Amino acid sequence: MSLYEILVFIHIISAIIGLGPGFILTRVTKSATNLTELQHGYKVKRQLHYFVMVGGSLLLITGLWMGFINPALFEQGWYIISLGLFLFALAMGPTVLKRNSKPIKTLLNEQTDDEIPKDYYPLAQRLYRIEYMENTIFIIIIILMITKPF
């Protein structure tokens, strides 16, 4: 097995490890009926996010490494667009997602009873829309990687 084939294998495993949990992060908190369940859901999301970070980091490293081994990839439209979309989605984490998660965290920490605050729902809907957009970007990347249309 060549180094390139090993990188492809690691790249695919990294996609499973990183993107798989990422696709369910939104669902983890949606079914909560009280504050205790909701807080637990956010703890689970935080734990799953470690898989997303490790898998995503390996995806970027192996994807670029394959490009350096096979520089022709940098001339392929699907590769360049996939890389650009991935970097854009990656940048959303510490910027847009964090900015929209912070008010939720503050709100839930300030709540004294076990009822989910009414102000939570519009904040959560905005966060969910952003997470769905990010998931859509990852689906587009997967489609580009599989079909290599241009």
Image (cartoon, grey):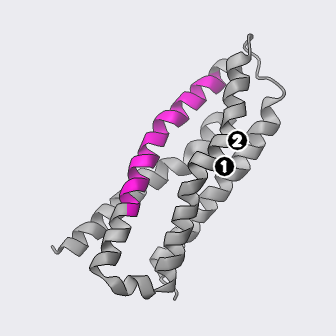
Which residue appears at 49% of the width and 41% of the height? 49
- Residue drawn at point x = 68 percent, y = 42 percent: 99
Q: Residues within 10 Å of mark 1 (few under 14, many from 20)?
A: some
Distance Cα–Cα, label 2 vs label 1: 6 Å
The residue located at (57%, 59%) in the rendering is 89
- Give the overall secondary structure of the magenta segment: helix
Amino acid at the residue labelled 2: Asn
Q: Position of residue 133 (x, y in %)?
A: 67, 58
The x and y percentages for residue 26 are 63, 43
Q: Is residue 133 magenta?
A: no
Residue 114: quadrant of the picture: top right
Q: Tell me where residue 126 sits by quadrant.
A: top right
Which circle marks residue 100 in the picture? 2
Quarter of the image where the N terminus is located = bottom left
Which numbered circle lies on residue 127?
none
**Magenta-colored stretch includes residue 47:** yes
Q: Which residues are magenta?
A: 37-60
Q: Would you call the spot at circle 2 few (<14 residues within 10 Å), some (14-19), or many (20 or more)?
A: some
On residue 96, the disc is 1
Image quarter for residue 84? bottom right
Task: Point out residue 57 in the picture as x, y percentages from the top left corner.
Answer: 40, 54
Asked which secondary structure carries label 1, the reply is helix
Residue 34 drawn above or below residue 10:
above
Q: Are marks 2 and 1 in contact (CB under 8 Å)?
A: yes
Viewed as shown, does residue 69 lie left or right of 55? left
Residue 141 vertical placement versus 112 (above, below): below
The picture places residue 12, in percent across and down from the top left corner, at 36, 64
